[in-house]
Amino acid sequence: MRVAHTYPPELKDEIEAQVTPYIPDLEFRTGDLQAIKAQVFDMLETNMKIIKYLIKEKAWDFFAFVDIGVDRVHHAFWRYFDRSHRLFEQNSEFENVIRDYYRVLDKHIGEILELIDDTYVLVASDHGVKSMIGTFCINEWLIQEGYLVLKTTPEKPIKLSHADVNWDKTRAWAWGGYYSRIFLNVKGRENHGIIDPINYEAELESLREKLVNLKNHKGQKMNNLVFRPDELYDQTNGDYPDLMLVYDDLNWRAAGTVGHDSHYLFEKETASGDAMHDWDGLFILYDPKKNLPRGKTCANIEDIAPTILHLLGEDVPEDLDGKVIKNVK
């Protein structure tokens, strides 16, 4: 496939001729762990060759790269790494895959550091990782509570978009993922809306209270977080949901499908889901000139861009989210 993933476009031909074709990602939800292991290490080796070539051969003021393999190796092999995982397997052949991946990555980072002088080095991740307990079937719960009505019950789990929904009686439905996006069927907004806008707030807050009090498979109250999008974002564009539901401090994810016989799934809806994203990621800033004070600090992801601009000697726009990280000023 000829995808123009570089600028200028001819840089792609140069990379392929001088180094190797770039690997943007891998399919990590197949369940074929041997293949995933081979592919994730191959992607790392391949892309690190490209990164080192560009560092050495191109003039740059700012150089950034993303290693998506760190995320993929967590999702695929976390149960073999985290001894507290409910599916942890002692002495598995995959027990050291994550550790080995970090060792190889660390070797490459060391080699990259040898190529650069007097350069600030910043390492950041947009999320952490934690074990996943299970998947909550939010649409099954909405069916039970009378919010979502189907004309016929599927014989096996299917996407909601493929289900025979009775929109004339449905008040809410949800999408799955790391959190749920929940939509109300509002008259005048949706094609078959039934909720009168005058009743919108009452419907939304009633549903929100129920979602906050959802229980897990053991009958224990989940530590759920339920937000209206405008509580999180200054602007809400596009077809945004009415509610956003984060399950049990990110210990569960959500199924957007219908046709399950329970609210709780412990076999993955799609292969490779041992790990969930966690709230806190990683932040490291290294100053080769030793002008920055040593120590620990906390940062928000919005602070990364203004900090980079500050280190480059550029003005930080006043309307940019985030601020220059403490002790970097």
Image (tube, grey):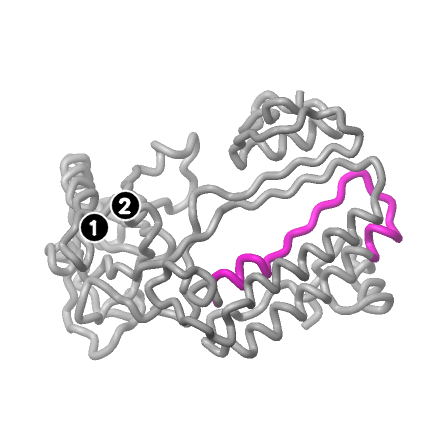
On whether residue 255 falls in the magenta region, the answer is no
What's the mark number on residue 318? none
Q: Position of residue 214 (x, y in %)?
A: 18, 49
Sort mark 2 into few (<14), some (14-19) or many (20+) by Cα contacts within 10 Å.
few
Secondary structure, mark 1, is: loop
Pointer 1 residue? 193
Q: Is residue 69 magenta?
A: yes
Quadrant containing the N terminus is: bottom right
**Residue at (53% x, 45% y) in the render:** 126
Side of 187 where 327 appears, left or right: right
Quadrant location of residue 41?
Answer: bottom right
| Location of residue 137 (image quadrant) | bottom left
- Can you give x and y, in whole percent of width and height, for residue 14 in the image? 85, 63
The amino acid type found where label 1 is placed reads Gly
Where disc 2 sits, the SS reads loop
The three-letter amino acid code for the residue at tag 2 is Arg
Along the line of sight, the residue nearer the viewer: 239 or 60:
60
Q: Left or right? Give the position of 138 relative to 67.
A: left
- Return the x and y of residue 213 as percentages of the image width and height: 17, 44
Q: Residues within 10 Å of mark 1 (few under 14, many from 20)?
A: some
| Position of 237 relative to 32 (above/below) | above
Q: Which residues are magenta?
A: 53-76
| Residue located beneath label 2 in the image | 189
Relative depth, front residue between 55 and 257: 55
Left or right: residue 189 versus residue 151 is: right
Instruction: Name the residue located 81 percent from the left edge and 63 percent from the top edge.
Output: 15
The residue at the point 80 percent across, 56 percent down is 52
